[in-house]
Image (cartoon, rainbow, N blue to C red):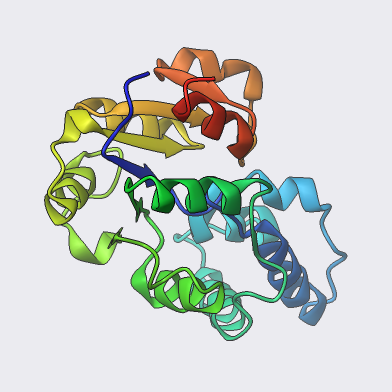
Amino acid sequence: MNRPRAVLFDLDGTLIDTAPDFVRCLNAVRTRYRLPHLPEDVIREAVSDGARAMIQVGFDLTPDDDDYFDRHSEFLDMYESEIAVDTRLFPGMEDLLGWLEDSGIAWGIVTNKPRRFSVPLLHALDLHDRCDALVCPDDVDQRKPHPESLFLASELLQVPPPQCIYVGDHIRDIEAGRRAGMITIAARYGYVRHPGEIGEWQADYIIDSAAQLLSLLQGR
């Protein structure tokens, strides 16, 4: 791999392990309604598909159901108030970010997570001022897998898309990156429902850890 000028990350399940706080909050809301806790892995698999998927997993509700929006609001309000209790960078990610910064390689985040949650989360983890670009769905007309958000990040960083890497743990991330003309890397360590199918995403590379990505960037 030629050394890129910028590395862009998806947020949940790629850069940061946010699942523990989602698991805790969703089960706390279930407790209010006298429902038993769900196993962590059941909720974890739904995180990359967003709050709608977690509400469906947690309460078997869709937006067509009467109680859906009440549960949705209750869950997200709790998550917002306790957004970084157990959330952490994935193992090895701090070393990777430090190397990027020391090497003069810009790094940023392109996520489908709204700014309402992304900004306070990054502040809580002392990442906001280190991140060179943050693009949320609030900033674009079309979410991933449309490439608009990646084109915007490229513009903000003033780095042409072919000189950018995009790392994600969902097929929509890889599709968006490919459509933007970026090098794509699939993070198998993230919230991947069927890891065995990740080879079908047509990513340029597949990694099992942040340390593996660091080695790849270093040419080792």
Residue 54 rendering spot, x and y as whole percentages? 60, 57
Q: Of residues 165 and 148, which is closer to you in this image?
A: 165
User: Total number of numbered labels?
Assistant: 0
The quarter of the image holding the N terminus is top left
Residue visible at 47% across and 54% down? 11
* Residue 180 visible in the displayed image: no
Q: In this picture, is 197 found above or below 43?
A: above
Residue 182 rendering spot, x and y as whole percentages? 25, 29
Q: Of residues 88 and 214, which is closer to you in this image?
A: 214
Q: In this picture, is 35 found above or below 45?
A: below
Residue visible at 63% across and 82% down? 82
Residue visible at 83% across and 69% down? 35
| Residue 166 falls left or right of residue 28 | left
Q: Of residues 51 and 12, which is closer to you in this image?
A: 12
| Residue 68 falls left or right of residue 130 | right
Residue 165 rendering spot, x and y as whole percentages? 33, 34
Q: In this picture, is 204 found above or below 173?
A: above
| Residue 31 falls left or right of residue 133 | right
The quarter of the image holding the C terminus is top right
Q: Which residue of the protein is positioned furthest toward the bottom in this rendering? A: 81
* Residue 186 visible in the displayed image: yes
The image quarter containing residue 64 is bottom left
Residue 200 rendering spot, x and y as whole percentages? 48, 13
Q: In this picture, is 47 found above or below 74?
A: above
Residue visible at 40% across and 53% down? 101
The image quarter containing residue 7 is top left
